[in-house]
């Protein structure tokens, strides 16, 4: 059950967290700051989505969150470039590999300049005044929470069985990862005394980590393939990344069988029970 005062406190905290991390980002947009600001925006978005429609459309808060999402998207691209760069660094230097790395650096630098301009706009916003006029009832919050919870559970129910049986269902794997991530942040809004939600959050975190690693392999090989460079060296990198991806998917399956007791749907039973405990 959501309580009004703790929710509004959490919303205010999430706004301050984004503001603080944007300031740190502008000082030094390194990998840690990129990660931290993206995480802060996810938490803000989770609280924002629980609000009634009138606060999610055309309000100062909605405009700020929209700008945050734009900032998040650009930094996600930068993070992906960094992942590809780190993976390529594992392989011996050659003309093709080095050419890809130079292209990555140039693209990343352009994206970073764009991100810094958005960050400057966010920094100038006085977040302390954004939620001054929000007047919402616990009933409205709970209704919206239940709706989003049901939607995310439905998404997981439809994608989870599919990816367990086919490692190449890349779109479904991506959708499952995103749904797990959103559900985890949504459950953070519940009181810590809710043991079911707490246990589920830990499981979702593990699943999210494994699925995120698989996504990094998929993004890397897709990027390298899209360059149209069919050199032996690039193809060897793609083959190597695909093999590591296969091993990571095996880890995903083993985790599901060992930790989630897939038989076949105990994990699904666990998340369905959230509807009654929330």
Image: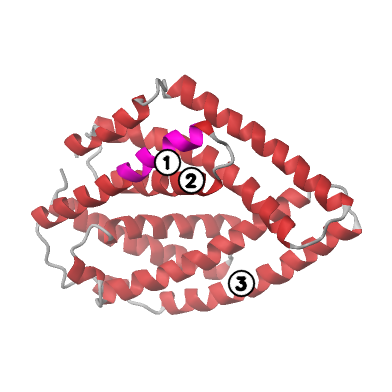
Q: Quick one: 29 or 194, which is closer to the camera?
A: 194
Q: CA–CA distance between discs 3 and 2? A: 28 Å
Vertical order, 4 against 228 (above or below): above
Would you say residue 240 is visible in this rendering? yes
Vertical order, 193 against 50 (above or below): above
Residue at 47%, 26% (x, y): give it.
Answer: 256
- The answer to whether 239 appears left or right of 140 in the picture is right
Q: CA–CA distance between discs 2 and 1? A: 6 Å
Task: Quarter of the image for the N terminus: give it.
Answer: top left
Residue 159 circle label: 1
Residue at 39%, 34% (x, y): give it.
Answer: 202
Sort mark 3 into few (<14), some (14-19) or many (20+) by Cα contacts within 10 Å: some
**Do tag 2 and tag 1 residues touch (Cβ < 8 Å)?**
yes
Residue 111 circle label: 3
Give the magenta range.
153-164
Of callouts 2 and 1, the N-terminal one: 1
Q: Quick one: 173 or 115, which is closer to the camera?
A: 173
Task: Quarter of the image for the C terminus: give it.
Answer: top left
Q: What element carries label 3?
A: helix
Sort mark 2 into few (<14), some (14-19) or many (20+) by Cα contacts within 10 Å: many
Give how far across and how far down residue 162 sits, in percent.
46, 37
Of callouts 3 and 2, the N-terminal one: 3
Of callouts 1 and 3, the N-terminal one: 3
Q: Name the residue under label 2.
A: 172
- The answer to whether 275 appears left or right of 137 in the picture is right
């Amino acid at each position: 059950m959501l309580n009004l005062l703790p929710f509004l406190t959490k919303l205010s905290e999430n706004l301050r967290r984004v503001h603080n991390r944007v300031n740190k980002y502008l000082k030094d947009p390194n990998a840690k700051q990129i990660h931290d600001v993206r995480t802060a925006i996810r938490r803000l978005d989770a609280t924002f989505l629980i609000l009634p429609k009138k606060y999610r459309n055309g309000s100062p808060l909605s405009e700020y969150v929209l700008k945050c999402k734009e900032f998040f998207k650009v930094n996600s691209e930068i993070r992906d470039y960094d992942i590809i760069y780190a993976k390529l660094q594992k392989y011996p230097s050659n003309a093709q590999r080095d050419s890809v790395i130079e292209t990555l650096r140039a693209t990343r630098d352009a994206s970073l300049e764009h991100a810094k301009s958005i960050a400057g706009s966010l920094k100038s916003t006085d977040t302390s005044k954004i939620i001054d006029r929000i007047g919402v009832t616990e009933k409205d919050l709970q209704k919206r929470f239940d709706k989003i919870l049901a939607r995310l559970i439905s998404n997981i129910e439809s994608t989870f069985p599919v990816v367990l049986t086919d490692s190449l269902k890349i779109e479904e794997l991506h959708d499952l990862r995103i749904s797990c991530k959103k559900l985890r942040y949504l459950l953070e809004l519940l009181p810590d005394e809710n043991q079911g939600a707490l246990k589920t959050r830990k499981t979702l975190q593990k699943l999210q980590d494994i699925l995120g690693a698989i996504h990094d392999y998929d993004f890397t090989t897709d990027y390298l393939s899209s360059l149209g460079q069919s050199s032996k060296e690039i193809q060897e990198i793609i083959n190597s990344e695909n093999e590591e991806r296969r091993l990571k998917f095996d880890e995903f399956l083993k985790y599901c069988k060992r930790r989630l007791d897939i038989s076949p749907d105990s994990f699904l039973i666990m998340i369905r029970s959230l509807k009654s405990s929330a």
